[in-house]
Image (cartoon, rainbow, N blue to C red):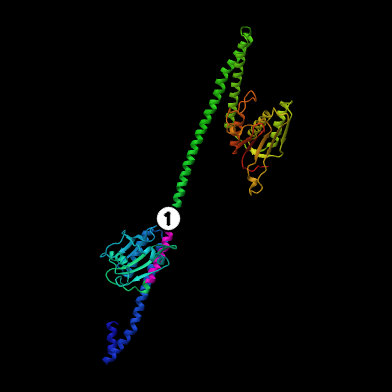
Amino acid sequence: MNSELRSQIRDLCRDDTAFDQLQQLLAAEIQPLQRDLNLANFRLERQHALFDVVTRLRSPLDLETIFKDTAIEIRKLMAADRVGMFRFYSESHWNDGEFVSEDVAPEFDSALAQKIHDDCFGDRFAIDYQKGRVQAVADIYTAGLSDCHLKILAQFQVRANLVVPLLQGDSLWGLLCIHQCHAPREWQPTEVEFVTQIANHLGVALQHAELLAKLQAEIVDRQEAQQQALELNHGLQQAVSELKSVNKELETFSYSVSHDLRAPLRSIDGFSQALIEDCIEQLDETGHDYLRRIRAATQRMGQLIDDLLSLSRVIRSDMHREPVTLSLLASQIFADLQQAYPDRQVESIVQPDLLDRGDSRLLHAILENLLSNAWKFTATRPQAKIEFGALPLVATVADAGHQPRTYFVRDNGVGFDMAYVEKLFSPFQRLHSIQEFPGNGIGLATVQRIVHRHGGRVWAEGSIDRGATFYFTLTTEEVGT
């Protein structure tokens, strides 16, 4: 009650006793109003503080700045000696940590970055704080705290303590601590409620920080992946450039081989033929045999050169994919073979309507080599049989229409020993003598190169005197009509 109002009431009350009674009655009425007014002012300031915290959460501020500004406002509003944010170390089972942010009165020591260890906290209290426990201690020396807890609080000159959990989602991240250092303090329910609300909003900031850290880590991972992709792409482009250069050198080498080797071979063969024609009388039978061997060797060398150039062209040639009817190609090749060897009686079987995508010229080369080999290696069979077909697709696979077809060429010829199957597709590797079955061993190597260029694979099965089967796939592309 101010002095002016008191003077007016005194003038109205001529009896001193009546004045004292009236003054007491008015004081009794005014005091609750004053408390309500103080409480309303505190709540208003609290709402302002909460609004500032929420505003900061919506701003692109880092967690350290949010903690620091919030600690300043809480200490000012609550007239506390220290407000700090304590963080537990990960993997410490909530027994170790440090203060990562604080605002403290200048007459008291800072608690920042001081490592704190408490053997009891993780086992006895962590689970309760994780469920939202709040500790409000008016005087640490009369609250029945453990000696280790008292020692930790005394280290920071604490006399009264208000502690609220900081939760990151459902996990206990740390503690929001309000310290009164110069004297004990009774913490009011409104103060506890206010600090709890602040802690809840800081928990939101912690979740945002966690999400931001994950997002930043993902961005870094993606940037690293993009950088790796760029480096791989650069390496690939360099490799393609080098491959083009190698192919160009190979092409030059092939032409060089074709030109430089053929000329001396033709000379050797020509002069050998001249010796046979012009000097036949001066040579005995041994000399004649030597010349025949020289001519045979030069002619074989010429054929080897032709085969190498053919294999080189298969590797270098451009591909033009289109729908190809493999059944028709196989039938035409069988007809050509039968016409070339009219005395042979061969049962040729072609599965109809086999359609795929690929380079028609190269696919013709695959079938020509495989069917010609089968024709050659069944020459000793009185009832030769050669079959071209495709294995049935697996009906239980949902996308069976996109499976690569497995084609095969099967014969009942002399077969081969599976112990040497890896040699079949190497250039000039033969499993039978040239006297028994002629050839240079380049056909299957050519087949393998073409199949690989179509994105497929080729393999073989066989046994001695029981025939052989060669399998190949091409691509998983759908066949257009």
Of 6 and 108, which appears nearest the observer?
A: 108
Q: Position of residue 11 (x, y in %)?
A: 27, 89
Residue at the spot of label 1: 213
Viewer can see residue 37: yes
What's the magenta region? 192-211
The residue shown at (26%, 91%) is 16
The type of residue carrying mark 1 is: Ala
The residue shown at (30%, 89%) is 21
The relative height of residue 231 versus residue 129 in the rendered view (above or below) is: above
Residue occupying the far bottom of the picture: 15
Viewer can see residue 52: no
The relative height of residue 184 versus residue 368 in the rendered view (above or below) is: below
Of 213 and 377, which appears nearest the observer?
A: 377
Is residue 232 magenta-colored?
no
- Taking the image as shown, residue 269 lies to the left or right of residue 159, namely right
Quarter residue 173 falls in = bottom left
Quadrant in the picture for the C terminus: top right
Q: Residues within 10 Å of mark 1 (few under 14, many from 20)?
A: few
